[in-house]
Amino acid sequence: MIAEDIVGDQIVLTAVGEPHVTERYLRWMSDPQVTQYLESRYSVPTLSDLGEYVRNMRESTDNYFFAIVERATGEHWGNVKLGPINRHHLNASVGIVIGEPSAWGRGVATETLSLLSRWAFAQLGLSKLTAGSYSANGGSVRAFEKAGWAVEGRQLSQVQLADGTRDDTVVLGLRREDLA
């Protein structure tokens, strides 16, 4: 489904495939520090589960699933998903995970979101992208904002953190016309 890689300064977005289904990927998705703000934290996957998820994403006509790879070394740092795409309204949601702790705080999420947004508008003709983030995940919210996204709202007490406290969900969006 994805014809070519999306190349940035420090990363490349490439279609997730079987070569990305590794112990490293499994380690991220089993690490409470990595998954603390992900809904996937409620189930610990197996390598087989990850392989099935990747196959489903590759076969989907409404989702694009990219590996975030360091440009210099080819090291797999995380994943970003665009979809499902609503082709009637020309919008899609975005979800991102930077699984490799050595990549945190280096602008990887911001670069990923910038590259993906530009690609979605230019190549897919989308008009609007949306995302949600736990309010406690300030790094994620800042990455979206640095990539040009706006906070559009807040869902109060929408989610429960691992420690049992309630947290808001920050609703983020980016319109094609706002990405100058």
Image (cartoon, grey):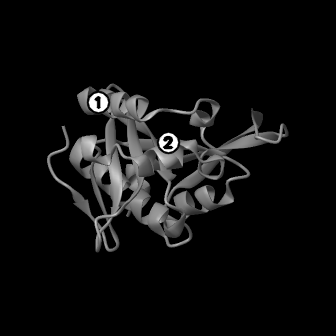
Say which element carries label 2.
Answer: strand
Residue 123, given in percent of the width and then of the height, sits at 22, 47
**Residue positioned 61% across, 56% down in the render:** 141
Q: Residue at x 54, y 62 (%)?
A: 143
Q: Residue 170 location in percent, x, y?
A: 66, 45
Q: Is residue 141 left or right of residue 88?
A: right
Furthest-left residue in view?
3
Q: Check disc 2: other Cα within 10 Å, few if <14, some if 14-19, many if 20+.
A: many
Apparent side of residue 142 relative to residue 107 in the rendered image (left or right):
right
What amino acid is labelled 2 in the image? Thr
* Image location of residue 3, percent across then percent down: 14, 46
Q: For the C terminus, give its image quadrant.
A: bottom left
Q: Quadrant of residue 74?
A: bottom left
Relative vertical location of residue 142 with respect to residue 154 in this rendering, above or below: below
Residue 84 visible: no
Q: Is residue 33 above or below residue 7?
A: above
Q: Which mark is residue 83?
A: none
Query: Residue 51, relative to residue 99: is it above or below?
Result: above
On the question of residue 58 being in view, the answer is: yes
Disc 1: which residue? 55
User: Foreground: 75 or 150?
Assistant: 75
Residue lying at 75% horizontally and 42% vertically, measured from the top left: 168
The vertical placement of 171 against 7, above or below, is above
Is 100 on the left or on the right of 89, as rendered?
A: right
Amino acid found under the numbered disc labelled 1: Arg
Point 29% across, 30% down: residue: 55
Q: Quadrant of residue 93?
A: top left
Q: Counting other residues with Cα less than 10 Å from the Cα at mark 1, is it few (<14), some (14-19), or many (20 or more)?
A: some
Quadrant location of the N terminus in the rendered image: top left
| CB-based contact (under 8 Å), mark 2 and mark 1 | no
* Label placed on residue 130: 2
Q: Position of residue 34 (x, y in %)?
A: 59, 51
